[in-house]
Image (spheres, helix red, strand yellow):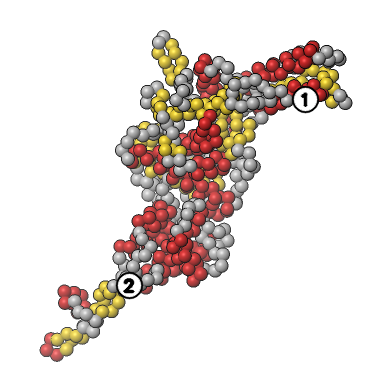
């Protein structure tokens, strides 16, 4: 097992490589590097626990993505991921963007241990070879070198080493060792630990380790590994009879203790564990979070994830792309020209109903604060200028209807000497809207991509405009909120945070598109909790 303390953390912000690989592989110096996703610029370096926790979370994430992506393929039914090809310990397929994806989510040193646990019963009967007084004449030629030769060509054999079945009602040390490693792994993977496994693991720890000693503790990792290796060697040395069950347990433990990484998985970029295109995983993570948070409000989703045991897709776009669509929602995402339709597929469209106050949609930028009056300029919080126009119109109407004196209006949005009590009344007025429409695109990119945009982001902006145009042709009264949703590592509790619009590229600002940072750790937790 590799030591998390020796892993080199590689962030996208300080890496010269531009590919989207996420996982562990060997670098040019043959050292193990842990390549993190986009948005992890703030991840702590040289932090054993943070690295360990992220590894096991990513391990569980890749395993879930593998199960979800290949479930139909393995069952020989229709599959959402086209052209899946099974390789040694992974899969190759093309995602919905027609991008080639290589997934290696099998780490032999962990997988063998878990698979052995599922395949074998814990009450394996330990068999030992002992000296037996019976004589098996069919094997007598194997013992001639131990025989005592008597006169008249007579030979005497004192005993023969034959298999003698001995029933034991306590676990062998080998099984105790196996259960100790298994319980340590399952604890880190946040899996339920079988009561019997826990008992045997505790017994092993009490007999062979010091208090608090653990496999995945920064201070005790190396000494614990050495102790386990010594115990395994002693078991192998003093165990006479070794059947198939013994070798299955022994090899699983040996691979875990002495293994580093799955060295059989070779690729043109070297040996690795991970995924070559993490955007496919990020999209599934975000879709799971959306269905967990606003499932009743989702009108359309370009996804076929498995959520709580079932695939969410209930329709097909353009005849063959599996999507989720509310029954009464007519798919408007196409451009028609000369009788032919070109279909589009936004990642998610949702509609949220409910009351909303002007104070939640407009920003009052104070210029001069007097005792009873205020000088201010009205701006939009969420780039909705229609709401600003209506709010300022209401302010002007109140001046006229209530015969308020001394107010000066500069342009359309700046007011001087406006009564504070009247401004409070207007801010707490309910906006008359039927609902807010969200168009979200999951983007596996860093923040800088939206400050200095490239051709890919330019195309994404154009797509957002087309989505908005198509949706408004179907729901003309909608209030559109467009956003690119990107990964972001943070220890803060906010699940989403908007980038400051002022630093975004002008074309993004002009088209009123948010760039929203999603808390990666929280999104991942939701993804793993809905298997």
Identify the mark nearer the N-term, 1 or 2: 2
Q: Quadrant of residue 258?
A: bottom left
Residue 187, percent across and down? 50, 55
Residue drawn at 46 percent across, 23 percent down: 328
Residue at the far left in the pictured view? 152
> Element under label 2?
loop
Residue 354 vertical position relative to residue 204 in the rendered view, above or below: above
Q: Nearer the viewer, residue 374 or 144?
A: 374
Residue drawn at 59 percent across, 41 percent down: 489
Q: Quadrant of residue 507?
A: top right
Residue 386, percent across and down? 65, 17
Residue drawn at 40 percent across, 13 percent down: 340
Classify residue 67 as left or right of residue 217: left
Residue 367, percent across and down? 81, 23
Residue at the far bottom in the pictured view? 151
Classify residue 153 as left or right of residue 129: left
Q: Is residue 235 visible?
A: no
Q: Is residue 402 visible?
A: yes
Position of the C terminus by quadrant: top left
Residue drawn at 41 percent across, 29 percent down: 314
Classify residue 221 as left or right of residue 68: right
Q: CA distance from mark 1 to mark 2?
A: 84 Å
Q: Are marks 1 and 2 in contact (CB under 8 Å)?
A: no
> Element under label 1?
helix
Q: Which residue is mark 1?
A: 424
Residue 224 vertical position relative to residue 482 in the rendered view, above or below: below
Q: Residues within 10 Å of mark 1 (few under 14, many from 20)?
A: few
Q: Which residue is mark 2?
A: 167
């Amino acid at each position: 097992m590799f030591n998390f303390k020796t892993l080199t953390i590689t962030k996208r912000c300080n890496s010269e490589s531009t590919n989207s690989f996420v996982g562990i592989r060997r670098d040019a110096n043959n050292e193990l590097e842990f390549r993190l996703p986009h948005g992890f610029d703030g991840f702590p370096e040289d932090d054993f626990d943070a690295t360990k926790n992220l590894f096991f979370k990513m391990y569980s994430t890749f395993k879930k993505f593998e199960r979800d992506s290949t479930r139909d393929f393995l069952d020989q039914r229709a599959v959402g991921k086209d052209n899946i090809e099974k390789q040694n310990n992974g899969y190759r397929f093309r995602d919905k963007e027609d991008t080639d994806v290589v997934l290696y989510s099998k780490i032999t040193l962990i997988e063998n241990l878990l698979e052995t646990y599922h395949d074998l019963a814990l009450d394996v009967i330990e068999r030992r070879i002992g000296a037996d007084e019976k004589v098996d004449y069919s094997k007598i030629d194997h013992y001639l070198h131990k025989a005592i030769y008597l006169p008249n060509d007579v030979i005497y054999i004192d005993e023969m080493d034959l298999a003698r079945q001995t029933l034991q009602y306590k676990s062998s040390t080998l099984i105790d060792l196996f259960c100790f490693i298994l319980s340590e792994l399952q604890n880190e993977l946040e899996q339920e630990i079988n009561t019997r496994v826990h008992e045997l693991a505790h017994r092993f720890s009490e007999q062979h380790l010091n208090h608090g000693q653990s496999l995945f503790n920064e201070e005790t990792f190396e000494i614990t590994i050495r102790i386990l290796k010594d115990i395994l060697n002693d078991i192998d040395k003093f165990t006479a009879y070794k059947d198939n069950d013994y070798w299955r347990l022994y090899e699983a433990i040996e691979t875990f203790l002495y293994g580093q990484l799955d060295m059989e998985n070779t690729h043109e970029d070297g040996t690795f564990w991970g995924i070559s295109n993490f955007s496919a995983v990020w999209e599934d993570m975000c879709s799971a979070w959306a269905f967990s948070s606003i499932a009743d409000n989702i009108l359309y989703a370009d996804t076929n994830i498995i959520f709580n045991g079932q695939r969410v897709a209930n329709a097909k776009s353009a005849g063959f792309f599996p999507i989720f669509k509310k029954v009464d929602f007519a798919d408007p995402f196409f451009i028609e020209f000369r009788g032919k339709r070109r279909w589009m597929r936004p990642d998610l469209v949702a509609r949220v109903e409910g009351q909303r106050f002007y104070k939640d949609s407009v920003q009052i930028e104070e210029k001069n604060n007097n005792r009873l009056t205020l000088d201010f300029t009205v701006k939009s919080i969420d780039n909705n200028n229609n709401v600003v126009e209506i709010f300022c119109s209401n302010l002007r109407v109140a001046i006229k209807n209530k015969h308020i004196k001394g107010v000066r209006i500069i342009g359309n949005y700046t007011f001087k000497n406006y009564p504070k009590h009247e401004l409070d009344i207007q801010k707490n007025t309910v906006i008359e809207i039927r609902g807010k429409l969200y168009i979200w695109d999951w983007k596996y990119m860093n923040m800088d991509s939206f400050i200095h945009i490239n051709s890919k982001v330019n195309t994404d902006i154009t797509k957002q405009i087309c989505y908005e145009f198509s949706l408004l042709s179907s729901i003309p009264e909608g209030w559109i909120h467009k956003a690119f949703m990107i990964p972001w590592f943070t220890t803060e509790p906010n699940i989403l945070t908007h980038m400051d619009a002022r630093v975004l590229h002008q074309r993004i600002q002009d088209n009123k598109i948010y760039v929203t940072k999603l808390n990666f750790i929280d999104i991942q937790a939701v993804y793993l909790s809905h298997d």
